[in-house]
Amino acid sequence: MGRSSNVSDNIIKLLATGLFTGYMPYASGTAGTALAVFFYWLLPVKAGIYWLILIVLFIGGTALCSQAEKLFGEKDSSKIVIDEICGYFITMAFLPKTLFFIVAGFFIFRFFDIVKLPFIRRSEKLEGGLGIMLDDVLAGMMGSMVLHIIRWLFRI
């Protein structure tokens, strides 16, 4: 049983830390978001597939965050970056897959994730994985709104 538990613990850590990018000593959230950019570039953007990716990231990420929080023994450990990956994917929802939007999405998402508007900060108070995920989901929604407004204003 001990060996099986270690394997599953390592899989949880691998996924929750974004292939271990969460172990970066500084700016682990930025490293996790950079990994999200890489995955976003590789994945198809067809609406049905994208919705499935978002749902799996949110539900799976919430469960992973709850487990990883216990493994790391600290609330919302900076090592956990699956929430940043999900947040970036939400930021990029239904936008053209262009270099401009990919880069702008990275910076705008990081801005909202770091600044944390009051309603986003309050969401962190929720317990477990939901509290870890929700602030990044909300930051992603804010980022997506900004990018969609830019797209509409400049017709790009």
Image: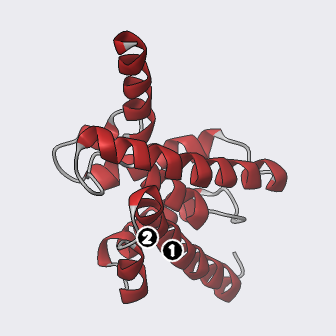
Which residue is disc 1 drawn over? 138
Q: Residue at x 39, y 20 (%)?
A: 5
Q: Disc 1 vs disc 2: Cβ atoms closer than 8 Å? A: yes
Q: Residue at x 75, y 55 (%)?
A: 51
Q: Left or right: where does residue 22 sit relative to residue 140?
A: left
Image quadrant where one finds the C terminus: bottom right
Q: Quadrant of residue 89?
A: bottom right
Q: Residues within 10 Å of mark 2 (few under 14, many from 20)?
A: many
Q: Position of residue 48 (x, y in %)?
A: 83, 52
- Amino acid type, label 2: Asp
Whether residue 34 is visible here, answered yes or no, is no
- Amino acid type, label 1: Leu
CA separation in Å, label 1 and label 2: 5 Å
Residue sitting nearer the eye, 80 or 34: 80
Which residue is disc 2 drawn over? 135
Q: Residues within 10 Å of mark 1 (few under 14, many from 20)?
A: many
Q: Left or right: where does residue 111 sit relative to residue 51?
A: left
Q: Determine whether the residue tagged by mark 2 lies in a helix, strand or loop.
A: helix
Q: Position of residue 126 (x, y in %)?
A: 41, 70
Q: Residue at x 44, y 72 (%)?
A: 108
